[in-house]
Image (cartoon, grey):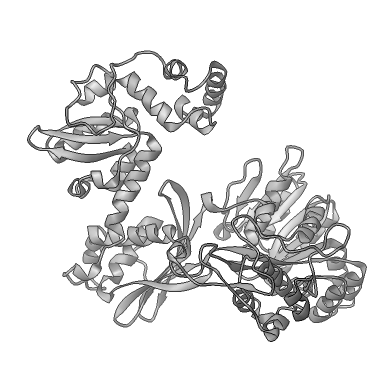
Amino acid sequence: MSTTQIQRAGPPPPPPARKAEGATWREPDRRPLGQILIEMGACGPDQLGDALAAQASEGERVGTVLVRMGYCTGWDVCRALAQQFGLPCLETLKPDQVQDELVEQLPITYAKTNEVLPIRHDEEMDELHVVAGDPMRLFGLDDLAQVYGSEPIVTLMPSETVRDLINTIYSKRTKDVDLEKKEDTLDEEDEDLLHASAEDAPIIRFVNGLIFNASKEKASDIHIEPGDKEVIVRYRVDGVLKEVRKAPKAHLPSIIARVKIMAGLNIAEKRLPQDGRIRRKIAGREVDMRVATVPVSHGERVTIRLLDKSAVMLDLDGIGIAPDQLRLIREVIHRPYGIYLVTGPTGSGKTTTLYSALSEINTPDLNILTVEDPVEFQLPGISQVQVQSKIDLTFAAGLRSFLRHDPDVIMVGEIRDKETAEIAIQASLTGHLVLSTIHTNDAATGVTRLVDMDVQPFLVASSVVGLQAQRLVRRLCPHCCEAVRPTREELGELNIVADDFYAGRSCLKAPVRDAEGNPTAPVAPKKYKLPPQGHVWKAVGCSECNGNGYSGRTGIYEVLMMSEEIRRLTIRNASGAEIKEAAVALGLRTLRDDGAYKVLCGVTTMDEVMRVTAEEA
């Protein structure tokens, strides 16, 4: 079939006897796609009208809109397109039905861009059998004919199925790349050789494999670390580092150059740190990567932070906040003014919490502005500004400018200096709600941190309405956890009353309370179950969690509201320890207390809570 035949959607040649089992063949149908779908019974006229209206405003194809709106399936659209273009169609195909040697000759970027994959080459009949997800992207079939030396025979499949098949097939090639098999040596000082090696296929597959497998294992960071004799690659999965690969030291310049090319960095600059970004679709998901390089004693080190936008839940109900704390947070974010601060170390989920809060209050009657470094998620209906230090667009400059744009809610990525703190306080005192983060270990020391920035204590007391500290703990794998009976000493370290715990009574010294102030029983979230009475869960490890015993992370939280007693201590310039002691007396549940509640709910383990809250010991 030639390119001209595809473009004109003319009658194709007779279906080959060797076409994939289950494929169907139809004559070309010149009617619009929507009319064909209605005749097939895949959607109704009203649904098609809704899709056409959405198509006019969004510019997407009508079939894509119908699938996105849930009016029909991808297979329905595929059958209709096959009827319209006169092509055979197929619903599914197993990876082992694809000839591996064909994939070696076709770059993955070409396959994904055109949604095509060669599956079988019949040299005797001079035919190349190809599956495709979009008949409008088949204008490059002449390229396939030149590469394989045979005429392409096209079978349509649903676009999503083709993309999944491409990811599955190519992942087999990337995950097993071994740089030890590459015999040529590289000279770190030879610039020309460095450029050549960066384009070498094994290096490209090695780096692509690192990124693909990191995304598959849900790693948050990739660390490429040069040693004396070899390059070590480590992933951070659920907050814990683990070594995954090694490569000969001779390949370090090639690996670093490849990452720099992908991130748009200067590959000739080895003496200074550099920062860049990579945006890729991996297995159909949008993944944003922040790349940082720095010269170290044995070469250059690279850290790649992965942000899978499709996997992040921006919902206060879904990030693990206990019901009583959630009531306090919702009360604050619906206030017309004041400052609410989220504290914690880097990588503790502070930005996700703030985005979740913004998503909840994001309504047409509120003007919401943010200044961030960097903008990690695009929130519809919210104006977001990214810090640009090179042109003096700092947090303070952005915040000062916001006040001239009549905002209702302002989010500041981080309060890190006196100027930003003072402008945030003035904004809150003049009728704006300000959400921000600050780097402290707990909620109480967030107050003293502002005072340490030379902000007047009375201004802190009058503007701050609440502070929230948080950490991330690993969630148990629900497929392999095991019940164990903890000792009294272990229970005591988590502020759990042993006698009440063994008897199945309310046992937390700082329990979760309902709206009336009564202690509530632990509730296991979806996919989890409460441990047996007198027991807690222990991590084991299975094939579902790669032997870790944990799968994913959830938050533990400490929410401190500014009461009159806390304000008096703030004005008196009391220490963080004094403020925390007073807050606990008023009912504050600390990070460790909330961690203990998560243990009783069957979400995590005692060891994990103790590891994350070690500073409270």
Residue 372, percent across and down?
62, 56
Q: Quadrant of residue 501?
A: bottom right
From where the camera sits, is residue 249 visible?
yes
Up-down relation of residue 40 to residue 590 (above or below):
above
Q: In the rendered image, which quarter contains the C terminus?
A: bottom right
Residue 33, percent across and down?
42, 19
* Drawn side of residue 593 relative to residue 184, left or right: right
* Drawn side of residue 512 relative to residue 211, left or right: right
Q: In the rendered image, which quarter contains the N terminus?
A: top left
What residue is at 70 percent from the left and 72 percent from the top? 596
* Drawn side of residue 186 relative to residue 414, left or right: left
Q: Quadrant of residue 483?
A: bottom right
What residue is at 29 percent from the left and 31 percent from the top? 22
Q: Quadrant of residue 262?
A: bottom left
Up-down relation of residue 210 to residue 24 (above or below):
below
Residue 591, percent across and down?
71, 72
- Direction bottom: furthest residue: 489
| 497 or 353, nearer to the observer | 497
Up-down relation of residue 582 to residue 368 (above or below):
below
Q: Count the numbered circles shown.
A: 0
| 146 or 26, nearer to the observer | 26
Residue 15, percent across and down?
20, 24
What residue is at 73 percent from the left and 52 percent from the top? 410
From where the camera sits, is residue 403 visible?
no
